[in-house]
Image (cartoon, helix red, strand yellow):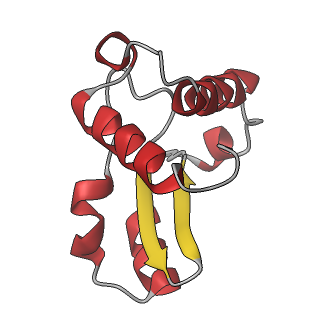
Amino acid sequence: MVFLFLSVKFKVDIHAFDDCVTDGGNDLGVDAIYITRMSDGPEIHVIQSKFHDSERKAGNAFKTSAMHKFRDFLRTVKNREADLDALANPVLKDRILEIRELLADESSLL
């Protein structure tokens, strides 16, 4: 469902997100990363979503562990010495390397 929303928001075909999905083991809490290249620099959209099969579960508070995982993701992106093979699944590793490359010309990383 989240990718349908994103396809409308970014005005792209829903299949454009196929290569963006990072969800799975060692995903550091990140479900997808969508990158658009703009003339004034990249836009990096890190997506973390939750799906619940009942209204009762949907009313549950967002767990702080999800925020801790996201913090760990940002630290991993910033730390160029991080062992990506140990920390991230192959798709997430590729996205992290892509983000680092895109931000290499920026004055500061994150």
> Is 104 placed left or right of 106 in the picture?
left
Residue 79 position, x and y percent, is: 56, 23
> Is 69 placed left or right of 107 in the picture?
left
Residue found at x 34% / y 36%: 92
Residue found at x 54% / y 25%: 76
Kindly indicate the quadrant of the structure image that contains residue 56. Answer: top right
Residue 87 seen in the figure: yes
Looking at the picture, tell me which residue is in the foreground, 56 or 106: 106
Residue 23 seen in the figure: no
Q: Is residue 9 above or below residue 106?
A: below
Q: Is residue 11 above or below residue 37?
A: below
* Quadrant where the C terminus is found in the figure: top right
Residue found at x 49% / y 26%: 28
Residue 58 position, x and y percent, is: 65, 46
* Quadrant where the N terminus is found in the figure: bottom left
Kindly indicate the quadrant of the structure image that contains residue 75. Answer: top right
Residue 42 position, x and y percent, is: 52, 68
Q: Is residue 45 above or below residue 13?
A: above
Residue 83 position, x and y percent, is: 39, 12
